[in-house]
Amino acid sequence: MLKVTLKGLAAHKARLVATFLAVLLGVGFMSGSMVLGDTVGRSFDELFADAFEGTDAFVRSREEVDAGLAGQQRGRIDASIADRLRSIDEVAAAEGVIEVSVRLDGRDGEALGGGLLGAPTLAGNWPEVEAFNPFELVAGRSPAAPGEVVIDRKSATEGELGVGDRTTVQTKNGPYEVTVVGIATFAGADSPGGANVVSFTFEDAQVQLAEPGRVDGIKVAAREGVTQAALVERLQAGLADGLADGAGAGAIEAVPGTTVAEENRGSVQDALQFITIIPLVFALIALVVGSFIIANTFSIIVAQRSREMALLRAVGARRAQVLRSVLLEASLIGLVASAIGVVVGFGLAKVLKAGLDAFGVDLPSTALVIDPTTVVVAAVVGLLVTVLAALVPALKASRVAPVAAMRDVAVEAVAGFRRRAVLGAAVLVAGVGVVVLAVLGAADQAPVRAGAGVFGTFSGMVLLGPVLARPMSRALGAPLPRLRGVAGRLARENAMRNPRRTAATAAALMIGVGVVGFFTVFAASSKASVATSIDRSFSGDLVVDSGSFGPGTGLSPTLAGELNTLPEVDVATGFRATLMSVDGKGTPVVAVDPETFPALLDVGVAEGSIGALDATGLAVHEDKATANGWRIGSEVPVRFAETGEATFVVGAIFSRSEVAGDYAIGYPAFEANVADHLDLQVYVNLAEGVGPVEGVAAVERVADTYPGAEVQDRTEFKQSFVDQINGLLAFVYVLLALAVFIALLGIANALALSTHERTRELGLLRAVGMTRAQLRTSVRWESVIIAVLGTVLGLGLGLFFGWAMVKALESKGVERFAVPVGQLALVVVIAGLAGVIAALRPAARAARLDVLAAISTP
């Protein structure tokens, strides 16, 4: 049987090309995603190992607020502790560390990096202790006076800055004119992990970046012969004995340098996990799509070889041997395709990295990391998918009766669909029901609970596919007899002839298009919701955007202050963000000016007043208030990284989360508990009688002196959100293109195998007068019917899932369900054209058949 299997595989290898490619591409994309993830992980491992190479211990505040993917914040400590640590015998050196986010101008006045996905610009003090300094000067010298900085070589290259050049850094105190006195590399690389870096003197960093006399932490080096563990133990004992008494609020701890390096690496990788998780998800989608092609291919081949299988059974082959024979074919295909796919994945990892660079995601430049685990996992997954997809056809092959060897023609039987219809309808209704109940239930759990319903809905559609294929093919192909005559009628009848095969071929495309449709609908709904939200909530004329994202970043409050002095401006108010623990859970919180904010933005206050937010006032979204039983006057335990625990009082309850999220505090509370005061955005209302052109010009004169500040009118403000969504959508489309391409390969393969199966029939058609052109037309339109069938079903699912996601996120501001009719219609047109392209080769081969040879085919 092994010899028969290998000879059969060699004889029919052309029929398995699409199956081979489907496995190869799916595994390639999967291994590429995993290799990219391993590479990013290794890069940041090395980066933080270099950054803390000479650090045996790190002294820092215990006070930390961890908000997961939203970030972490830790309080600062007194810089004088470093002097006290140096008095400990086990300590060789100790130095305070400051690190914050800023914006740096290039030679052209444009800020480097920044944005949602761009590289951050980090600023801190230039390390004076050699053991703590991972930088190496390649030009100039270290900073020695206020206003002198060292920048990384990447920033120097991108910003066209050299030693002696003057530029501007956006700090919490406002624009700061600096002179570049040195250019440095980081552990041999142009920059640390693609970030831009600006280093000041220690004293200048405290004034411009942190607070005089305060640091983010202290690096400590041990004397020779003292281990990290021993040093940490000694430092902890010293701190417990009062070494840090009077040195600032909050407890202080000492941890090993390796612990801090690992924590930093984990935080960065958590923030960048979309780099590997999203491509990996789409790789799995591609493999699922490929599994349909594998199953369909083997089903057709088994049907075509039923007579061969029967002969094997007739000469003594057991069912188990036939089963093993088919599975061995699948295993060999899966093994070889997976092995090649793993190799292809190494190249795809470079392509993915280049694609992320194009979208503004800067990653460390390093050689690809090829982990043996990645190779094994990707290869095993590819092999298992292939074998499992071929299992049902293999079981059918093993059940072929020996008497089937006496048949002249081997055609796959089409059984009744009553049981399938009942089961498929039940699964579909259950899946839809779970999704609907999930999105109409608890808002916080809706997306998670809907996941099971989505799987059930997909499964129900797959089960119902053969039931729907015949009537839908009839409907989709109804115009063809009038438009294309006999060829059109034949195309429709061929699509209807074997609904199970048609459905299996269309199912692969249905999945790919379904995901495309979902993202298209969700993106359109998000853009429509943003526009509605801005129109409803923002009553101002202009927005000055910082180009930064998240707590601890933004523009100096001096910008809003300067704008308020302009005669062209009626009022300008800053919008800030920080992290805060509310009732024991870390979460982002916004900070607003209680006096000016209500004049520019409306958060839908239902009870209380934003203007009443004092040093302990808290505004809460109505969903959070209801869930926790809070009312106006309720006391809520909170905690800040800088000042620790406090009790706030609910002073306002609002309904619009798209502006303020779940929680908001006033400037008095923010300034009392947060060290760095920065505005993510500044909202501006022009004075009465000031036109848009005049107002924009006046605001830009001030904003242009702040690196990264961008003045936007209402239309541009909306468009900035749309551009971000479109950028992410383009990234998703690129990834989904692979799954759709694999699905089209499946259509081409199914048509090729189908025309091979119908060789005698095609020969008879040619013999009774059908032209080559008519034959090509019939094959092409059959492909179009299958492609449009999969597309229509996929778009139906995509619309439903898009609606469900919008409903699930309604409380988060995605409240408008928008159907981009033009884009979805374009998807259908593209699918039809793709169907024509997929049919080109099968149609050409069918048209070239030798009539006499075809008629004589058994």
Image (cartoon, rainbow, N blue to C red):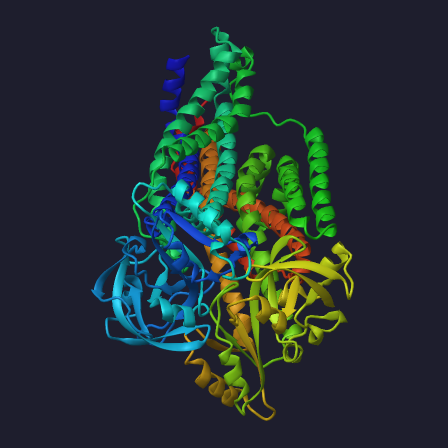
Q: Classify residue 201 by image quadrant.
A: bottom left
Nearest to the observer: residue 204 or residue 468: 204
**In the image, 699: left or right of 482?**
left
Q: Nearer the viewer, residue 271 or 520?
A: 271
Q: Quadrant of residue 688?
A: bottom right
Residue 40 position, x and y percent, is 38, 47
Q: Is residue 777 visible?
A: no
x%, y% of residue 437?
74, 47
Quadrant in which the N terminus appears: top left
With respect to residue 189, does 38 lie above or below?
A: above
Question: Eyeballing the image, is 437 above or below 500?
Answer: below
Q: Residue 362, relative to residue 19: is it above or below?
A: below
Say whether residue 225 is visible: yes
Residue 53 in the figure: left or right of residue 740 = left
| Residue 390 drawn at (x, y percent) | 50, 26
Q: In the picture shown, does residue 466 fall above or below 698?
A: above
Q: Position of residue 62 (x, y in %)?
A: 53, 53
What count of labels does the image hold?
Answer: 0
Q: Residue placed farthest to the left in the image?
A: 139
